[in-house]
Amino acid sequence: MLALNRIAGTLVLPALLLLQPASAQQQEAQAATPSVTVSGKRQAADASEFLAARSRVLGRKYASSCNFMSAYNPNEDDIVLNYMRDFNLRADGANPIASAGAPGPEVLRDSSPYGDAESGAYNTMPGTGAPAETAAVDPMAPAVKCSGADRAFAAGRNYIARKDKTLDQAIAAYEKGDYKEAMAKFRENYNKLGYDISALMIGKMTLQGLGTPADTTQAVTWLRKVTDARFSPSDRMKFDPRDPSAMSERAEAAMLLAKLHLAGAGVRKDARAAREFYELAADAGYVPATSMLGLGYLSGFAGERNPSKAVKYLKEAAEAGYVPAMYQLGRAYYTGEDGVTKDLKLAGAWFAAAAKQGHAGAQYAAGRMYDLGESVAPDQQRAIAFYKDAAVKGVPAAQNALATYFYTGEIVEKNPATARKLFNAAAMGGQRDAMFNLAVMTSTGEGGPKDLSMAYVWYSLAQASGHPNAGAALKEVAPRLSKEDLAKADAILKPAARTALTK
């Protein structure tokens, strides 16, 4: 007789979670599932922000004292400058959104970084009232705002950037597969302008041996140029949950360096160094790295297990809209392992949030909670809907659970053929209950042809996977096999070793 086990013991990721159905007392204490806040539905970054140097207004971050020694001017915040750009407002002291009497953003033109000599409008050195060019001060000394050297450097760099075509040429050559030319142009661009994207591409190409001999040491040097470049909070990338693999140059370089140190590929294997690079990628705004840190602190990555940090990082990533973090956070609350306080209501809320975004593991987990009535009222209709979504995506435990409904005829119309197909799909995915259930149906001919040899195979595989009833079933079916049946089963379970053909 088929001994069904609808609720499999996995949540489709590393650990087995053997769970018992909710007790009547638990079901009586149901409460509304709490909601979770996901605020990560952002628009993709404006393409015009890709290279600030395309603007004729000089980027202050390329001149040290302009960027770090200036007095604070709220009109120079990125959000204000972007607002003025989007609405075609003037980005100078006469801008219409500046409050009366308040200075507008300082605009440095690469053709006249010290001011407009023809009109007599000069940028004065703060506190002197004199034109910057004629101020009786050391031109190399940093001022409260910008030194003469800073202005000259920023102006020259911006002028080169506006006219330079080496980056476009490098990308075009790379896309054509002319890696030698691409490497030369990326190097030329970096030497001229120091663009992070060029250093990143040189590092990646050197790592892969494209256009240059593969050299991990040199690749790491170039990647470190990106991660060690000047960075401020305003440079954080904008994470888009719809495109979670998109990375800024800084984040991508950090992720590559983390992987190299994890694997010890060409560098010293060092989990702590890897974690530091994940932290750098997370600081750069790459949310999947934040999720990785959360998982790391759950498992004791790099020798440190910290449940509070784990939950903090996972929650940060989940609230930013990163779906795998939603699932992992739900799983952490569900199991109550690794020092995280068990909370089925929060687990269900995060599973539901991830399931809504199409995460297959979360769909199975949410269905399971409705099937068992964990933290919610039992609802087999909703459970079946979640199981179906996960089963279509190939989750073996969901396929097994859905098959049991078709086998018993609960909620859905009884259909042994469909049940057997689903058990077979789940069994092929390594689900041990499905292996046992498929063996029973195959031995009796339910939902398909009777085949004792295949029943013997599936019972054997179920036993090897730890199914508690498979051993007894094997003893019952073995005497019924003919020599031919047994030979067929052995050929599947113990295939002959392949020998190399020699001439």
Image (tube, rainbow, N blue to C red):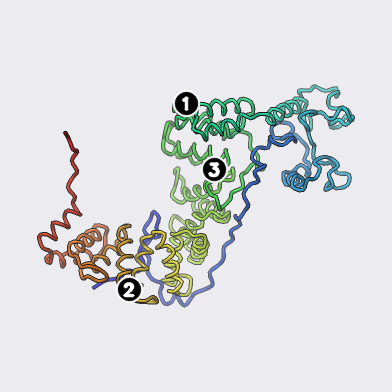
Residue carrying label 2: 415
Percent x, y for residue 434? 30, 64
**For the view shown, which residue lies furthest in the left direction?**
483
Image quadrant where one finds the N terminus: bottom left
Query: Is 68 located above or below residue 28 in the figure?
Result: above
Give the mark nearest the N terminus, 2 or 1: 1
Contact? badges 2 and 1 (CB < 8 Å): no
Residue carrying label 1: 212
Query: Is 387 located above or below residue 488 in the figure?
Result: below
Of 346 and 51, which appears nearest the observer? 51
- The local secondary structure at tag 1 comes to loop
- The local secondary structure at tag 3 comes to helix
Residue carrying label 3: 279
Q: CA distance from mark 2 to mark 3?
A: 52 Å
Percent x, y for residue 287? 55, 48
Q: Amino acid at mark 1?
A: Thr
Of 186 and 306, which appears nearest the observer? 186
Density class for disc 2 (Cα within 10 Å; few <14, some 14-19, many ≥20) is: some
Q: Amino acid at mark 2?
A: Asn
Q: CA distance from mark 1 to mark 3?
A: 30 Å
Quadrant in the rendering for residue 142: top right
Q: CA distance from mark 2 to mark 1?
A: 61 Å
Query: Is 371 located above or below residue 174 in the figure?
Result: below
Density class for disc 3 (Cα within 10 Å; few <14, some 14-19, many ≥20) is: many
Give the mark nearest the N terminus, 1 or 3: 1
